[in-house]
Amino acid sequence: MLSSSQSQITFESGGKAVRLDCFLPESTDSQRFPAVIALYGSGGNHAGMVEPAGMLARQGFAVYVLHYFDRTETENAYDKAVIFRHFPIWMKTLWDAVSFVENQPQVDKDRIGLLGFSLGAYLSLSASAIDTRVQAVVEFFGGLPKEMKLFMRRLCPTLILHGDADPTVPVQEAYHLQELLEKRGVPYEMQIYPGVGHGFENEVWQDAGFRTLAFLKKYLATG
């Protein structure tokens, strides 16, 4: 297991400064690592991303937590109207983030994945449907917006993690995504947790973490 460092940098998107929390494996040479851009959910809880980002960095991934709310000066997005209005702007912000991250000296630009929670998962899946630079997606209790099916160019290997008692994002979203991936012959893995709601804790969180690491190693760490 590698040691890792934590820092924060900014890039520009739409004339706004957008923050990235960086969790990087420490290396003494010019080694390039697979990158993971991580997106929080509607609550904007970037602090909650520290644990999974740090874990992945220690396993050899360059992780960037994207403060995509910076672009719209949003504190949270619990209102559906806010999400609908800002979603395309956040999508462009994520596109710009990939462009920025792929040019970082420690990043292998051919091995970039997305990790999204809830709203962040919707954004990650939507971006992966149009951005060929994205090689893998891990989505926690999210889905693919129906509107994206009109614009979808492709899908990439996806890990679906969802609770079947989720009152916020129904588990049907996971099954719809599964059906779409199967129709297109795209590799995927899926774990539905019985009786689990929106957000994972304890053993479920730990299991999801193991699955996330194994999936990202499978699709990003060898390249």
Image (cartoon, grey):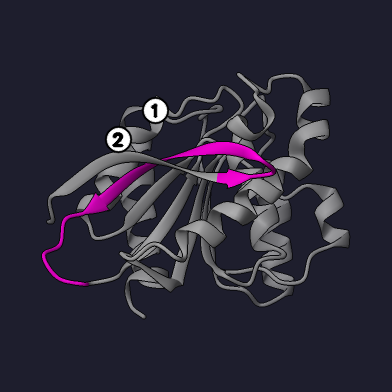
- State the separation of the CA atoms marked 1 and 2: 7 Å
Residue occupied by mark 1? 48
- Quadrant where the N terminus is found in the figure: bottom left
Identity, as a three-letter code, of the amino acid under mark 2: Glu
Q: Residue 86 carries which label?
A: none
Q: Position of residue 211 (x, y in %)?
A: 37, 53
- Quadrant where the C terminus is found in the figure: bottom left
Residue 112 in the figure: left or right of residue 149: left
| Residue 15 belongs to magenta span | yes
Q: Position of residue 165 (x, y in %)?
A: 60, 29
Taking 113 as reference, is 156 above or below it? below
Q: What stretch is highlighted in magenta?
A: 12-30
**Quadrant hosting residue 142:** top right
Residue occupied by mark 2? 51
Query: Mark 2 and mark 1 in contact (Cβ < 8 Å)?
Result: yes
| Label 1 packing within 10 angstroms: few (<14), some (14-19), many (20+) | few
| Residue 94 belongs to magenta span | no
Residue 222 in the figure: left or right of residue 29: right
Q: Where is residue 123 in the image (x, y as percent from the top left)?
A: 65, 46
| Label 2 packing within 10 angstroms: few (<14), some (14-19), many (20+) | few
**Quadrant hosting residue 35:** bottom left
Residue at the far front: name it.
15
- The residue at the point 32 percent across, 71 percent down is 221
Residue at the far bottom: name it.
223
Identity, as a three-letter code, of the amino acid under mark 1: Gly
**Quadrant hosting residue 9:** top left
Does residue 165 appear in this view? Answer: no
At numbered mark 1, what does the secondary structure look like: helix, strand or loop?
helix
Between 156 and 165, the residue placed more toward the observer is: 156
